[in-house]
Image: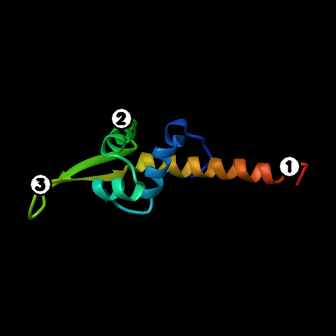
Amino acid sequence: MSDSAEFDELIHAPTRLRLCAALEPVTALEFGVLEEGLGISTSLLSKQLRVLADAGYVTLAKRRQAVGRPRTWVSLTASGRGAYRRHVAALRAIIASGSSGPDR
């Protein structure tokens, strides 16, 4: 998967960008950990994850616990990880081009 720069409007929305950033370095995170870590409501997290899942960028998996109810785990797909990395590369390119302008 190439890490060339490619701006992604779907990922760029602030909450979705933060979600992808949290998921990129890990295999999976539990829904409650994401909710608490990002400081957002259950409904907002659910809505944003649905958008990313519909695009094929994340997967959601219910896992049974020894005690209590099943928990939902969230993972970036290979496609989502690549899209996020390309988006970050595009943001870095924008920043780099701005810092080399004539006024600098």
Image coloring type: rainbow
Give the CA distance from mark 3 to mark 2.
25 Å
Work out whether 42 lies above or below 24.
above
Work out whether 56 lies above or below 77.
above
- Of tags 3 and 2, the one toward the viewer is 3
Foreground residue among 18 and 38: 38
| Mark 3, residue position | 69
| Mark 1, residue position | 101
All told, the count of numbered labels is 3
| Mark 2, residue position | 54
Query: Helix, strand or loop at disc 1?
Result: loop
Q: Amino acid at mark 2?
A: Asp
Farthest residue in the left direction? 67
Q: Could you tell me residue 99's position as x and y percent?
A: 80, 54
The structure residue drawn at horizontal position 28% and vertical position 56%, both measured from the top left corner, is: 32
Mark nearer the N terminus (1 vs 2): 2
Foreground residue among 67 and 100: 67
Mark nearer the N terminus (3 vs 2): 2
Q: Could you tell me residue 70's position as x and y percent?
A: 14, 54
Residues packed near mark 1 inside 10 Å, few (<14), some (14 to 19) or many (20 plus): few
Marks 3 and 2 in Cβ contact (< 8 Å): no
62 relative to 28 in the view: left or right:
left
Q: Could you tell me residue 66's position as x and y percent?
A: 9, 64
Mark nearer the N terminus (1 vs 3): 3
Marks 1 and 3 in Cβ contact (< 8 Å): no
The structure residue drawn at horizontal position 43% and vertical position 50%, both measured from the top left corner, is: 19
Q: Could you tell me residue 28's position as x and y percent?
A: 32, 58
